[in-house]
Amino acid sequence: MPLYMDIHNFTDGVSAEDVAKAHAADLQTEGGYEVRYLRYWVNERHGKVFCLVEAPSAEAASTVHREAHGLVADEIFQVQEGV
């Protein structure tokens, strides 16, 4: 299954607590789309969130975000894990 990293940019700021809630909503929604949100990182100071997701396509990953909480990524890239 392909891996994707998405990037969210929040010009009004973002809190780790809010991101944790959004991630929990992703986990509740992902099963219907063969998607697994694996990890996320938050930079509150710069208003950035990064999500690592296993999904059949970038569109499937985006659909889960949209349905779970409406916060779709600004960018999404297919990535490969290094050793």
Image: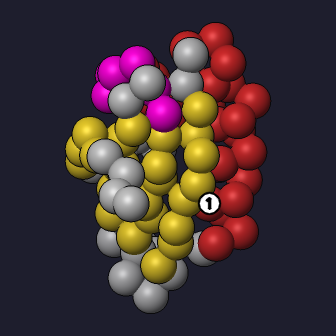
Question: 46 left or right of 54?
Answer: left
Residue 3 left/right relative to 35? left
Vertical placement of 53 versus 29: above or below? Answer: below
Among all residues in the image, which is located at the extreme front? 83
Q: Can residue 14 be seen in this view?
A: no
Q: Which residue is drawn at 47% across and 52% down?
A: 51
Residue 49 pos. (x, y %)? 45, 64
Query: Residue at (63%, 25%) from the top-left corner?
Result: 30
- Per the image, the residue denoted by label 1 is 19
Instruction: Name the image quarter holding residue 17.
Output: bottom right
61 vs 38, nearest the viewer: 38
The spot of residue 32 in percent (x, y) is 64, 11
**Quarter of the picture holding the C terminus:** bottom left
The residue range painted magenta reads: 54-59
Residue 20 in view, yes or no: yes
Query: Residue 55 in magenta?
Result: yes
Q: What element carries label 1?
A: helix
Q: Is residue 45 above or below residue 80?
A: below
Question: Going 67% across and 25% down the picture, which residue do you hit?
Answer: 29
Q: In which quarter of the image is the N terminus?
A: top left
Query: What kind of residue is marked 1?
Result: Val
